[in-house]
Amino acid sequence: MSQQPTGIHHIAIMCGDIKKHIAFFSEVVGFPLVALFDMHGVPGGLHAFLRMNDFGYFSLVQLPDVDRIPIEIGVTHSGSGAAPCAAGTLQHLAFRATDEAELLAMRDRIRSHGVNVIGPIDHGMCKSIYFAGPDRMTLEVATSAAPVAAERWIDPAVLAKAGISPEEAARFTAPAPYAGPGNVAQPPYDPTKPHLDYPEKVYRDILATPDHVITESASYAEPPVPAAG
């Protein structure tokens, strides 16, 4: 049993006009649309999924009045792969190409839709192309010929810049497996830990609710379109 995520199931991007994003990521990038439905438990929300491969999806969320929230370069968005934005926001998103030939084919596909593409640029650990998406998104497609070799790519000088000691680096490069029991109870609320942003009473009530009750009350397992026949 794997004790780490095995990849990305989906990346969810907020959009003011979900149709514009669906058109871009299907026609320009090449991801087929496989799901579009009312967002589960979110009034007024729309949720789309486009397939990247058999195990990963690109997801879009449209919520009411999102188009009225201002985009601010340097705050909400970086605007390029080398520019800042607020901590916790998406600096840029890189999709994967299988090899360099596929990377160049993606460059040509995107350019054929009138979208400018920079690259490829060889970073050693990967080769990349760069372009923009709807709503000022900063996008990349990258390919690596081999897995990244930690012994060549973890710079001791940069570990020091990041405040990471040799002992911490050893832990980070070889995370300890989880050897504890299953069915771990919800831990007590600790304000020093990361938390989802709900009204405090609602959040504490959720945390106090047994897992099986959350599963039973909040699940939406049936597709919106009935099965044929």
Image (cartoon, rainbow, N blue to C red):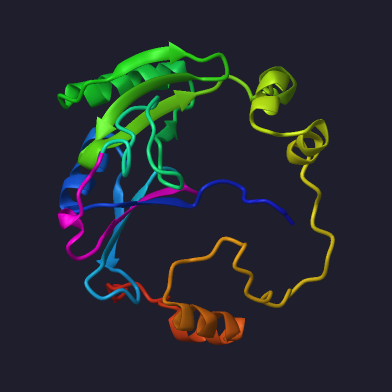
Q: Is residue 170 above or below residue 211?
A: above
Residue 181, percent from left and from top: 82, 70
Which quadrant holds the N terminus? bottom right
The residue lying at 57 percent from left, 60 percent from top is 194
Residue 153, percent from left and from top: 66, 20
Q: Is residue 50 above or below residue 159?
A: below
- Give the left or right position of residue 143, taking residue 109 as reference: right
The residue lying at 22 percent from left, 42 percent from top is 135
Whether the magenta-drawn stretch holds residue 65 is answered as yes
Which quadrant holds the C terminus? bottom left
Whether the magenta-drawn stretch holds residue 61 is answered as yes
- Give the left or right position of residue 97, taking residue 49 as reference: right
Q: Is residue 195 above or below residue 92?
A: below
Residue 40, percent from left and from top: 34, 73
The residues colored magenta run 54-72
- Give the left or right position of residue 177, taking residue 93 as reference: right
Nearest the viewer among 127 and 153 is: 153
Nearest the viewer among 73 and 30 is: 73
